[in-house]
Image (spheres, grey):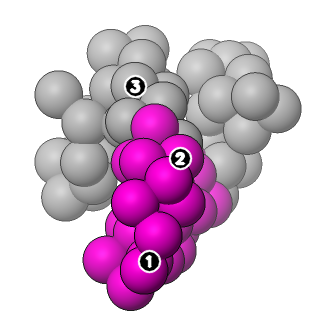
Amino acid sequence: MFLKGIATDMNQTTIRRLGATKTVNDLHAILSYRAEDATSSATRSDLQAKIRELEKIIATIKESETDPELLNIYQEFPGQ
């Protein structure tokens, strides 16, 4: 995922890394909301799979981050 590349690249500025991570988190929130409202179990399952993938991406970003301020912000985001 393009955003994961930006968020885990320590050569990027902190604001770019934060922006990329925030966008991934926003996508997670949108899909979570849609999954709650899904009437079809197939649709819900598909959305939940995408949600789990985004959670893995967020966890990878958290593991890669070295900036204490960003790590503090990321504690509010899902993922391990």
What SS does tag 2 mark?
A: helix
Residue 21 location, x and y as percent?
54, 48
Q: Is residue 32 magenta?
A: yes
The quadrant where residue 68 appears: top left
Mark whose residue sits in front, 3 or 2 = 2
Amino acid carrying mark 3 in the image: Lys
Main secondary structure of the magenta stretch = helix
Amino acid carrying mark 1 in the image: Ala
Within 10 Å of disc 1 (Cα), the crowding (few <14, some 14-19, many 20+) is some
- Residue at the image position 44 percent from the left and 77 percent from the top: 38
Closer to the N terminus: mark 3 or mark 2? 2
Residue 7 location, x and y as percent?
62, 33
Closer to the N terminus: mark 1 or mark 2? 1
Camera sees residue 1? yes
The quadrant where residue 44 appears: bottom left
Residue labelled with disc 2: 46
- Residue at the image position 40 percent from the left and 25 percent from the top: 56
Camera sees residue 71? no
**Label 3 to label 1: alpha-carbon separation:** 22 Å
Q: How many marks?
A: 3
Which residue is nearer to you in this view: 12 or 41? Answer: 41
- Residue at the image position 38 percent from the left and 36 percent from the top: 52
Residue labelled with disc 1: 38
Mark 3 in CB contact with mark 2 (< 8 angstroms) = no
Residue labelled with disc 3: 56
Within 10 Å of disc 3 (Cα), the crowding (few <14, some 14-19, many 20+) is some
Mark whose residue sits in front, 3 or 1 = 1
Q: Is residue 19 magenta?
A: no
Q: Residue furthest right?
A: 2
Extent of the magenta region: 21-49
